[in-house]
Amino acid sequence: MRVFASATHVSIGIISPLLWKDNLAHANPLPRSVESGVQLELNRQKMSLDKNQATSLALFCKVVDNYGDIGICWRLARQLQQEHGVAVTLWVDDLRSFQRICPDLVLNAEVQRLAGVTVRHWRNQEGVFLASDVADIVIEFFACDIPAGYIAAMAGCHPRPVWLNLEGLSAEEWVEGCHTLPSPHPRLPLTKYFFFPGFTKKTGGLLRESSSEEQRRQFQSDQAAMAAFLAQFGVTKTEAVAFKVSLFCYPHAPVSALFDVWQKGGTAITCLAPEGVAGDAIQAFLGTQAKAGAAQTRGALTVRVLPFVAQPDYDKLLWACDLNFVRGEDSFVRAQWAGKPFIWHLYPQDENLHHVKLRAFLQRYAADIESLIALSLHWNGASTENVKEQANWSALWLQFQADMPKIACRCFEWEREMLENGDLACNLLKFACSLRK
């Protein structure tokens, strides 16, 4: 949690490979009755956002994790505008990272409008602002210290804006106690409130667009659409029918070790990785530069490098693959809505605090599936007993592979549980409305 004075980052039996993949391919999405019931409740929540609902919102984002920070803010900004009619201004300091997930963005524009959202280049902490410049809701993502001039203008507004610090996602128990806590400004007549995404009803929930489940259902039921989507990246028919893995991780992930196991295994695997991800390991496997379009097959493993794509296409990539390796927060959340098994790679923190976050999540999610726990821990350098022990990646993968049908079932159970918490955008607006009454 962060306060005004400081900031601390608190995010073996073997089955037939063909049968294993077939079971995953035919796993049913959430029953329509369950989905419809949850959607009715979400619609009711939206209707309850009455005349007290804010009409404008400013979201400040400083890019730390390259794509995770801006990924979350860009999704939230679009959803608030498109589903709730809020006039959103997104302030971003790093437009180059932003452009990789939003190709339409113009790098040298100080102000531009994309998908109904006003995007401003946040160059520094300077600037003079008037009360008329201030939005009804002001959000700082990850306690990013918005300009002092903007804060001063906030203090001059009547009524004063709702000020929220949108925190990072964590499954740790203390989050529930800190969610929506107030933090009065030491000098100005302003109060900032902490808003935490999370995995229980006592948190803000997870980002999820109202149309995402239906879009996924239609895409995954249309084999021709999935094949055409993958073909645009050069994925061949042979690669498309193999067991498909998407790979998005931080540079320190033990990718080479897993590649070695996969290429020596008995299951054909196609690994799809965005350009710039796991560059050293992928370049070593390819024997050439890891540029978009590059591909190489060694043994049972084919590795193909994809270009970075806009967020809707990244969602489709997750939907089209059988297993997703994701990182940070944005892709982590999207993997949970993809209905497919996934492995989470966390951004490294001092004193291995990311291992604490990982274990907290696995305690809620993994449902005592030991192979899922073991592979997740080793992927993050956090083995169960001795961090320095030598991982047996072949055994880890074979055990995980055998449990894939069980893990796939757990994915659907987890999605149903998360749907019951409502979506973060709705929950955030509902809380803001309660402060404006």
Image: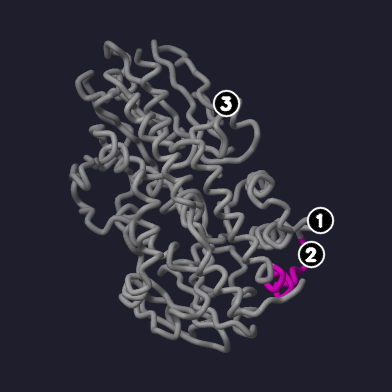
Find the distance from the CA under tag 2 to the CA under tag 3.
36 Å
Give percent across and percent down for residue 322: 51, 68
Where disc 3 sits, the SS reads helix
Image position, residue 51 (x, y; %): 27, 19
**Residue 149 visible to an observer of this rendering:** no
The disc labelled 2 sits on which kind of residue? Glu
Residue receiving disc 1: 385
Residue at image position (40%, 81%) is: 294
Query: Quadrant location of residue 81?
Result: top left
The magenta stretch is 388-399
Reading the image, the residue beneath label 3 is 178
Q: Badges 2 and 1: C-beta atoms under 8 Å apart?
A: yes
Q: Which mark is residue 389?
A: 2
- 202 w.r.t. 331: above or below: above
- Give the distance between the C-alpha atoms of the residues marked 1 and 3, in whole angstroms: 31 Å
Q: In the visual, does 166 lie left or right of 80?
A: right
